C-alpha cells in the first residue's frame, strides 16, 4: 500500500516546475530611446488647464465633441507670438491649434458659467479652417482664468496694431505735407519770376513813351 501511495504522489508533482535552470535569454531586438519632438520646445507655457472642447458643425447645426484633454497658451521665446494648443488625453492628438490674434474675442457661453466660446482660424487638421469653438471646464474659476488670459494676450496685440497704424498715418501725412510744400515752392518761384519779368519790362515801356513825346514836342512848336 505504501509503495502505490508514493507512486501517486510522485505523479502529482510536475517535474521541474520550481527548478531554476540559470539560462539567460537575450532579447531579439534591442529598443533604443528616441527623442520625440512635440514642437513645444521653444515655447513657454502661460496657462495649462484640463477641459473638454467642442466645435460647431454648420451642416448639422449642432455642437460636436472635439476631445477632452489639456488646453495650453504657449508663447514663442523668439517671436513672442502666442498660440492656443489642445491635445486629447493619453493619445495626445491635437484638438485645436491656432494663434491668438488681435481683435479676437472670447465670451462666456450663454447659460453656462463653466463654458466659453470664440472664433478662430484653426490648423489642427493640417489646414486652416474657420471654426467656432466651445470649451468647458470643471469649475467656474478655471473658465474665468481662461477668458482673462485669452483677453490679456489679444488686447496688447490690438493696441500695438493700432499704434503701428497711427504711426503709418503720421508718416503718410508728413509725406503729403512735404510734397505739398515742394509744389507750393515751385508755384511761388514761378510767380516771383513772372513778377521780375513784369518789373523789368515796365521801364522799357516808359522810356519808349518818353522818346515818342520828345519827338512830338519840336514838331508842335514849329
Image: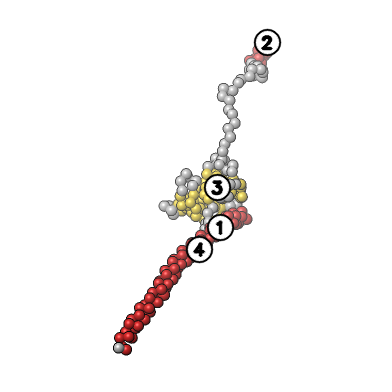
Badge 2: how crowded within 10 Å, few (<14), some, or many (20+)?
few
Comparing labels 1 and 2, the label whose residue is closer to the camera: 1
Q: Which mark is residue 174?
A: 4
Q: Name the residue under label 3.
A: 85
> Which residue sits at x=55%, y=47%?
85
Above or below, comparing residue 161 to residue 219 in the picture: above
> Which residue sits at x=58%, y=57%?
156
Q: What is the spatial separation of the Cα atoms under label 3 and label 1, in whole angstroms?
A: 24 Å
Q: Are marks 1 and 2 in contact (CB under 8 Å)?
A: no
Disc nearer the start of the sequence (3/4): 3
Comparing labels 4 and 2, the label whose residue is closer to the camera: 4
Q: Is residue 18 visible?
A: yes
Q: What is the spatial separation of the Cα atoms under label 1 and label 4, in whole angstroms?
A: 21 Å
Q: Do the residues labelled 4 and 2 touch (CB within 8 Å)?
A: no
Q: Name the residue under label 2.
A: 3
> Which residue sits at x=64%, y=17%?
23
Q: What is the spatial separation of the Cα atoms under label 3 and label 4, in whole angstroms?
A: 43 Å
Comparing labels 1 and 4, the label whose residue is closer to the camera: 4
Amino acid at each position: 500500500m505504501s509503495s502505490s501511495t508514493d507512486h501517486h504522489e510522485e505523479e502529482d508533482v510536475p517535474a521541474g516546475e520550481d527548478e531554476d535552470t540559470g539560462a539567460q535569454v537575450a532579447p531579439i531586438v534591442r529598443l533604443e530611446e528616441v527623442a520625440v519632438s512635440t514642437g513645444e520646445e521653444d515655447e513657454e507655457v502661460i496657462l495649462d488647464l484640463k477641459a473638454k472642447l467642442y466645435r460647431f458643425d454648420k451642416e448639422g447645426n449642432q455642437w460636436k465633441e472635439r476631445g477632452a484633454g489639456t488646453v495650453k497658451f504657449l508663447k514663442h521665446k523668439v517671436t513672442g507670438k502666442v498660440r492656443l494648443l489642445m491635445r486629447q488625453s493619453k493619445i495626445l492628438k491635437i484638438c485645436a491649434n491656432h494663434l491668438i490674434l488681435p481683435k479676437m474675442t472670447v465670451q462666456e457661453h450663454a447659460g453656462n458659467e463653466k463654458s466659453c466660446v470664440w472664433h478662430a482660424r484653426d490648423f489642427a487638421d493640417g489646414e486652416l479652417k474657420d471654426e467656432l469653438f466651445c470649451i468647458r471646464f470643471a469649475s467656474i474659476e478655471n473658465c474665468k482664468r481662461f477668458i482673462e488670459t485669452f483677453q490679456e494676450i489679444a488686447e496688447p496685440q490690438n493696441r500695438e496694431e493700432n499704434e503701428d497704424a497711427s504711426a503709418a498715418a503720421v508718416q503718410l501725412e508728413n509725406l503729403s505735407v512735404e510734397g505739398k510744400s515742394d509744389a507750393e515752392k515751385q508755384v511761388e518761384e514761378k510767380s516771383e519770376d513772372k513778377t521780375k519779368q513784369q518789373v523789368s519790362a515796365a521801364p522799357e515801356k516808359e522810356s519808349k513813351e518818353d522818346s515818342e513825346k520828345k519827338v512830338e514836342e519840336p514838331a508842335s512848336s514849329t
